[in-house]
Amino acid sequence: MATILQLESRISMNKHIKEITLLALATSILFVQELMFSFIPNIQLTTFLILVYTSVFGLKKTYMIIIVHVFIDNLLFGSLGMLNIWIPMALAWLLIASIFSLIRKKTDSIIVFALSGYIFGHIYGMMFVPFQAWLIEIDILLYLIADIPWQIIMGIANFLTILWLYKPFEKFLNELYSRYI
């Protein structure tokens, strides 16, 4: 009897180790792709990946990925002590994952997901507006107006990557996750 319990315990621990490894890999992919695209302003796959992670891993695990990603991102780029960077970044990604989780429960429409991705580009940018306007001591409306083109660029990039890549990548990651864990 003790042998069966020990075996079940090992299987359970092995499953947790595999899951932690997979989540660490997902976090690494999130971080590395941002580095790869960092030379192009507001073009990245972060929103797309967060949406897929939310769908496949669930909200709680995606929250963990986001928190680790934001910490590593700000640690590497030297903005960890700058509240005007990491707080809005964390809040934006957590909010985007939360909103998408609600959308995902209501529909499976790729068009809705892509349109949401466009809106998420604006949400992400808007989260920074009050922090940045305060930091550089500029009128918040002027900062918002100056930031709108960059939000549009991010929104369009989100729309297209979600429209083209979401379904196949979600399917791939679901299969990998169910087979691996």
Image (cartoon, grey):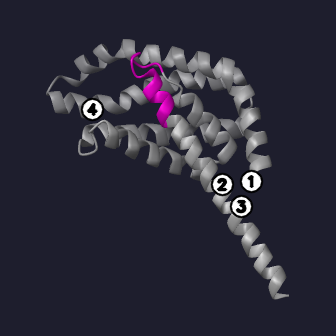
- Give the residue pinned by disc 4: 130
Dot 1 and dot 3 residues touching (CB under 8 Å): yes
In the rendered view, would you say 95 is above or below 34? below
Foreground pick, 5 / 47: 5
Foreground pick, 35 / 87: 35
Rounded to the nearest whole Å, what is the CA distance between mark 4 and mark 3? Answer: 43 Å
- Give the residue pinned by disc 2: 19
- Give the residue pinned by disc 3: 15
Q: Amino acid at mark 2?
A: Glu
Rounded to the nearest whole Å, what is the CA distance between mark 2 and mark 4? Answer: 37 Å
The magenta stretch is: 31-43
Mark toward the start of the polypeptide (4 vs 1): 4
Mark 2 neighbour density, 10 Å: few (under 14) some (14–19) many (20 or more): some
Q: Amino acid at mark 4?
A: Pro
Mark 4 neighbour density, 10 Å: few (under 14) some (14–19) many (20 or more): some
Dot 2 and dot 1 residues touching (CB under 8 Å): yes
Rounded to the nearest whole Å, what is the CA distance between mark 4 and mark 1? Answer: 42 Å
Residue 42 lies within the magenta run: yes
Dot 3 and dot 2 residues touching (CB under 8 Å): yes
- Give the residue pinned by disc 1: 181
Q: Secondary structure at mark 2?
A: helix
> Which image quarter holds the N terminus?
bottom right
Marks 4 and 1: which is nearer the front?
1
Q: Amino acid at mark 3?
A: Lys
